[in-house]
Amino acid sequence: MDLNGKHALITGGGTGIGLAIAKALAEAGAEVTITGRRKDVLDKVAGGRIHALTMDVADEASVVDGFASAVAERGPIAICVANAGIAEGKALHKMDMDFWRKVIGINLDGAYLTMREAMKSMTGLDYGRIIAVASIAGIKGLRGAPAYTASKHGMIGLIRGLSEDYMGSPITFNAICPGYVDTAIVSENTVSIAARAGISEEQALKMMVKTNRHQRLISPQEVANTALYLCSELSGSINGQTMEIAGGQM
Ligand code: NAP
């Protein structure tokens, strides 16, 4: 795979799944801008073809400025991965408007702003890839997490809508839908589920692992491999799709 000369921007690219994707794209030759709110986290992993940019996806001005500076430094965005997200679960009766806005603001508004700004420089290129890191919660309901489920269903709706609007152009729009992946989100969920359900962290982890059809956590690298495929010329006719990575059918 040769992504030489292509500029990729990955939101939430300083950790977990985003970082695995950043490394995979950089190894394939792309210049990769990674974004996130924590500068120290980004700076620690930047180097070579990976470039750090502080940007909050829930803040419109920050996204507009961030994309403008990335494009000024490294040229138009040919690959954009909307990966930044939070996975906090709360039952309906325990949610308030602030919680709802926080989840939708980062996961869904953030994906919209990211894709909107990416399209400004991607439109007109002879190649383009927009990838959303959604979740199996974008395909089926995730118990105890209605706001997260709604945000991930929304991301998939956005991808499907855009794939229709830009049909026939060289840009494809796809969503990756992982089950539980071995990242900070799962470690944090293990602690919070255990506390909410009054069970041990080991039991909480087992509950999550059981959701993956092959009974193990998915590695960030497995998600990155799918992103790499979606960036390749091999996937040019795959558009408006959801790629489930959950060890089996959901
Ligand atoms: P992670 O390591 O916690 O990654 C989340 C990333 O998003 C962090 O780098 C974080 O950086 C960034 N982020 C969060 N809020 C942001 C904001 N307002 N603006 C900019 N960046 C923000 O966990 P992960 O598992 O790799 O998650 C990546 C994506 O995969 C998420 O969208 C998640 O929903 C999805 N996913 C994860 C799993 C799983 O089991 N791990 C399963 C399915 C889908 P800062 O905090 O520095 O901003």
Image (spheres, rainbow, N blue to C red):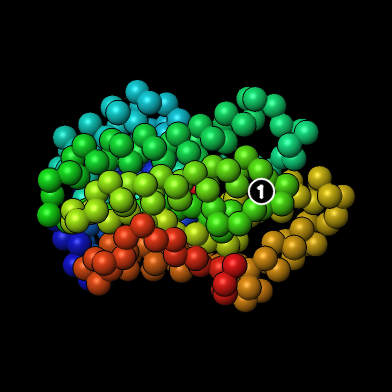
Q: Residue at x 19, y 56 (%)?
A: 168
Image quarter of residue 91:
top right
Whether 219 is drawn above or below 129: the answer is below
Q: Which residue is mark 1?
A: 188
Whether 44 is drawn above or below 116: the answer is below
Front residue of this view, candidates 113 and 180: 113
The answer to whether residue 72 is visible is yes
Q: Is mark 1 within 8 Å of ligand 1?
A: yes
- The outermost residue toward the right is 198
In the displayed structure, does residue 131 sit left or right of residue 28? Answer: right
Front residue of this view, candidates 99 and 33: 99
Whether 78 is drawn above or below 249: the answer is above
Q: In which quadrant of the rendered image does the C terminus lie?
A: bottom right
Q: Residue at x 35, y 38 (%)?
A: 114
Going by the numbered disc 1, the residue's amino acid type is Glu
| Numbered disc 1: secondary structure | helix
Q: Residue at x 57, y 36 (%)?
A: 103
Q: Whole-percent x and y of residue 47?
A: 29, 50
Q: Whole-percent x and y of residue 190?
A: 71, 53
Front residue of this view, candidates 202 and 124: 124
Q: Whole-percent x and y of residue 197?
A: 84, 49
